[in-house]
Image: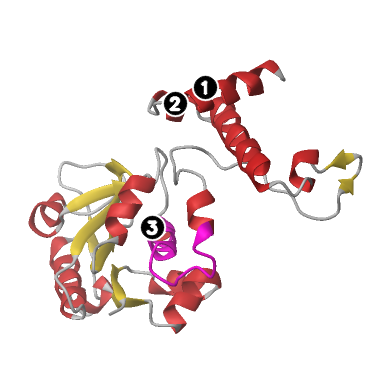
Amino acid sequence: MSMQFGIVSLFPEIFESLHHGIVGRAIKQHIIECKFSNPRSFGLGKHAVVDDKPYGGGAGMVMRPEPLIAAIDDCQRQLSHPPLKIYLSPQGQSINQAVIEELASKPSLLLVCGRYEGIDQRVIKLAIDIEYSVGDFILSGGEFAACALIDAVTRLQPNALGDKKSLLDESFSNGLLEYPQYTRPKNYHGEKIPHTLLSGNHAIIAEWRLQQALGNTWLKRPDLLSKRQLSELETDLLQAFKDHL
């Protein structure tokens, strides 16, 4: 059974970008399915109105509840299982890899993409299970956040990646950032491949990669290290990394 994404959006054409790369392959192989509903199809009057001025005044427009709720209901009917209904919002809980892993275990997700100044609060109260944010910044709409979420969740679906081991080595998979990666040529503008990677000794390479992951995390995301209980080996490797800076 494919994992299903329901997507409520005024601009479904944005999601054409999903038909490329890993997600595109997953769609072709029926690992995931995407179902769409456009609130404009349920807009009010001859002009199919979906927004209105906010009560109390203020700049911009707010998406009305009637067409949005109708689109959510329509999208939900297209899904085989009752979905977790998510509103992509800067006010939502921050998405991290742990959240992605939890979402990847669901049979279906329904993603509501806001526009303008946001959506009527009654939609959130009546039809949304949880709000998620991709970061503390503002986007033009929820579509780009939804694309990022779909990509991240799809990668964790069975058979979505050609090499399952790549999941284990990626940043955040074990609470650390990934170690540096190198490929040919061995010497590029005087920058050489670390000798350890050329040794052919897999145990030494694995230890070097762990040390680099620890050091990379310490340099770039020390907040992640504060949440991790380091083993004695990891402590020694990190100290050696610091000593060689």
56 over 228 or under it: above or below: below
Marks 1 and 2, the one that precedes in the sequence: 2
The residue closer to the viewer here, 122 or 133, is 133
Label 1–label 2 contact, CB within 8 A:
yes
Gap between marks 1 and 2 measured at Cα: 6 Å
Region rendered in magenta: 145-165
Mark 3–mark 1 Cα distance, whole angstroms, equals 34 Å
Give the left or right position of residue 172, taking residue 114 as reference: right
Q: Is residue 130 above or below residue 36?
A: above
Relative to 219, does residue 129 appear above or below in the rendering? Answer: below
Give left or right: position of 73 versus 26.
left
Q: Earlier in the sequence, mark 3 or mark 2?
A: 3
Residue 236 x/y as whole percent? 57, 21
Residue 230: image tag: 2
Query: From the viewer's perspective, is 73 left or right of 201?
Result: left
- Please tell me in which quadrant of the rendered image residue 75 appears: bottom left
Residues at circles 3 and 2 in contact by the CB criterion of under 8 Å: no
Q: Where's residue 198, x and y in %? A: 79, 47
**Secondary structure found at label 2:** loop
Q: Which of 180 and 234 is in front in this view?
A: 234
Disc 1 crowd rating (10 Å Cα; few below 14, some 14-19, many 20+) is some
Q: Mark 3 points at which residue?
A: 149
As measured in the structure, the alpha-carbon distance from the residue carrying label 3 to the one carrying label 2 is 30 Å
State which tag comes first along the sequence, 3 or 1: 3
From the viewer's side, name the closer residue of 210 and 12.
210
Q: Position of residue 155 (x, y in %)?
A: 44, 63
- Which quadrant of the figure contains the N terminus? bottom left
Q: What element carries label 1?
A: helix
Look at discs 3 and 1 and give the one toward the viewer: 1
- At 33% across and 53% down in the image, what residue appears? 101
